[in-house]
Image (spheres, rainbow, N blue to C red):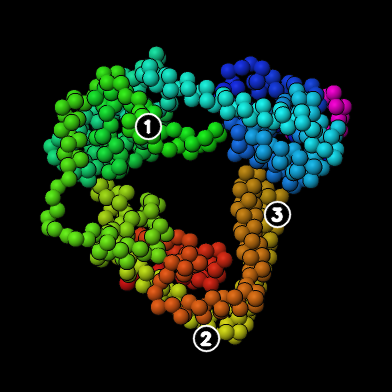
Amino acid sequence: MGDYVIAKYIRLSIEDAKTDSMSIGSQRALLDKHIVDMDAIDATVIEFVDNGYTGTNFERPAVQELIEMVREGKVHCIVVKDFSRFGRNSIETGYFIERVFPLYSVRFISVCDYFDAADHEGDTGGLEVAFKFLTHESYSFDLSQKIKAAKQEKMRRGEYVTKNCTFGYKLNDARQLVIDEPAAETVRLIFSLALEGKKPLQIERQLYAERRLPAREYDKLRRGTPESELSCVWSTTAIMSILRNEQYIGTYVAGKTKIVGVGSGKAIKVPKNQWVVIPNHHPAIIEKDVFDTVNHRVNEKHEPRRKRTLTTSQRYGDELNSPLKGKVYCGCCERMMKQSAAKDSKFHCTHTRAAVDAECYHLNIPVSSLCAMLLGTIWERARAYTKVGELHGAKRSDKRAVQQSEYEKRIDGLGEEKRRLYERFVRGQLDAVGYKTESAALDAQVLQLVGASSALSTGQTNTQLKEFRELASSICSEETLTHQMVDLLIEKVQVYPGSRVAVKWKTAVAAFFEDSQQVRAG
């Protein structure tokens, strides 16, 4: 890369793609011509492209990479077609052009706006530039409103405006909903089982036993993913969503959510009375009387077996407020484990509760046992630090010195092995492919040992040991596992069959628990 670096930034949103003058190719040609006219012969030109991203915010991969290079001093000039290509938000765009780029001595050029920062040293381009910022931002807002209005009009006409269809349907060439028979068969089975009075968990188990794919996995299958790589595990949420979906009786339903604001990816729910609902819009998979009967049963609230003045959450509130909540994961399927609402509360792997052949089927661990086990591990390590004191630090230093010497001997030994390997290659005792393979294996071992040696040499200092002892002293005064203790020490807890538990400690205190990665609950 040359001494002077020019960065071309090109952005194309989905709406811009409909206009040829805004295409990536036309922007590139315009910028290339301008750079040639700049007569920057010895400059290195690099290109950044965000294809299909809005300009109302800076959450774009290419522009973030460009800004990072600016901060590292690797870019000296940025060229864009116009201000709106870099950003349509006047405040953020102005901040970069007026504050950030001048700070790093980066020249900013907007070709179609006839703006060159080199011509405006000491000022911000005046009222004309500010007015253009506001114009672009206003245009983006206006365009967003027009697109929203167009989509709402399409919804009122019953046109499908989203990419994905409801599970059981597909779009034909005219973008009309037609029945997707393989998926529709699964939908009919779900309603049939619900009509028989089966609970969602029972339906989950039968769907798993029959190897029926849920919506997301079915989409992967249609896109070409091998069936052997797909999961047939369903969730209660997915089943209830199907049972309550009016689209299965031929009713068009749209407008259930809306985007918070221009450039935002966050959606919020819309009240049901504001949805677009069109009966008899497309072929029905489920008869209306079956749908109504099933939903009456689903929504029916049965009388409790016995009258209670307090709910489960109220009665067992303390047990449900475990400091480990949100930190416990299944070590097999890697899903977060849920805490049961009961007196003897447990963490359960509910993801595979219907998958009888799964390794983590019915995997659970009592909350009290897990807390006690972790507290015991933390206490044991804390007491060791408070009792041993400076002597402990000295012993650890001696231990590190021995390990460091061992690493160096092994690195020297691998170097000798590589020398002998080369001699065999020169003598013709080993072909080129074999030499490259074995040499690469030796290099990998050396690299690993060098990394371990480096990490050891920059290990705990006396200051760190002092901080650990202070931490240990405060932990020893705790009688139970607290939220503060968990937040400070524990990143993640993984539970495996046989009550085996692996703990991932926070990076800052990992050395404090270096020998306590795997433990077993009592």
Q: Mark 1 points at which residue?
A: 256
Query: Looking at the picture, which amino acid does disc 3 mark?
Result: Glu
Q: Mark 3 points at which residue?
A: 423
Label located before the other in sequence (2 or 3): 2
**Magenta range:** 36-46
Label 2 crowd (10 A; few <14 / some 14-19 / many >=20)? few
Q: Is residue 45 magenta?
A: yes
Instruction: Give the alpha-carbon distance from disc 2 to disc 3, as whole Å.
Output: 55 Å
Residue 246 screen position, x and y as percent: 27, 28
Label 3 crowd (10 A; few <14 / some 14-19 / many >=20)? few
Query: Looking at the picture, which amino acid does disc 2 mark?
Result: Lys
Residue at 30% over, 42% down? 237
Instruction: Give the alpha-carbon distance from disc 2 to disc 1, as whole Å.
Output: 62 Å
Q: Name the residue under label 2.
A: 387
Query: Relative to 14, is 4 above or below?
Result: below
Question: Which mark, by number, is residue 150?
Answer: none
Label located before the other in sequence (1 or 3): 1
- For the C terminus, which image quadrant? bottom left
Residue at 79% over, 46% down? 103
Q: Is mark 3 on a helix, strand or loop?
A: helix
Q: What element carries label 1?
A: loop
Residue 361 screen position, x and y as percent: 28, 53
Say whether residue 409 is visible.
no
Q: Do the residues labelled 2 and 3 touch (CB within 8 Å)?
A: no
Say whether residue 198 is visible.
yes
Query: Looking at the picture, which amino acid does disc 1 mark?
Result: Lys
